[in-house]
Amino acid sequence: MSSVLEQLKTEVLKEELKLLFQEAYDLGVKESRIQHTYPHLLTKKDLAEIFQVKDSTVNKIVGIKGFPKSNFVTARYPRDEVFKWMRTNSDQCLNL
């Protein structure tokens, strides 16, 4: 009887993990699609849309030490680096 119960628990756990992994995958695909709708070099207008903030707040964000900037074009920001920065530094934007 206990082996049947353990087997059922294992099957339930497998199904729950399967759903969890699928949700994580779907979220990753959705975020990637959103990210790649923007050009490789972002403008401040793009940043305002991405961060959902006003232009004045964008100016504060791009002034944060370590915020990614293009080395070749003035006032442009590398898309992939910006999204990576967002994932690791979102706490720095809370006090703006």
Image: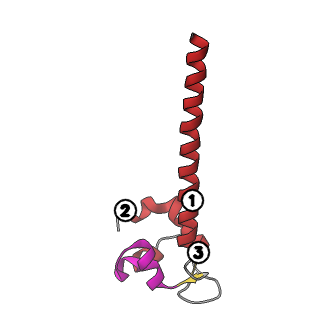
Q: Kindly identify which residue carries mark 2.
A: 94
Q: Quadrant of the N terminus?
A: top right
Mark sitting earlier along the chain (1/3): 1
Residue 10, picture quadrant: top right
Question: Camera-side residue: 88 or 51?
Answer: 51
Q: Quadrant of the C terminus?
A: bottom left
Q: Main secondary structure of the magenta part?
A: helix
Q: Amino acid at mark 1?
A: Gly
Q: Kindly identify which residue carries mark 1.
A: 28
**Hey, which residue is sitting farthest bottom in the picture?**
74
Element at label 1: helix
Q: Examine the rendered structure and indicate whether residue 7 appears above or below residue 16.
A: above
User: Which residue is rendered at x = 57% and y = 70% of the image?
Assistant: 33
Q: Examine the rendered structure and indicate whether residue 29 appears above or below residue 36.
A: above
Q: On the picture, is 18 further left or further right than 64?
A: right
Residue 13, picture quadrant: top right
Q: Which residues are magenta?
A: 43-58
Q: CA distance from mark 2 to mark 3?
A: 25 Å
Q: Is residue 75 magenta?
A: no
Q: Amino acid at mark 2?
A: Leu
Q: Which mark is residue 48?
A: none
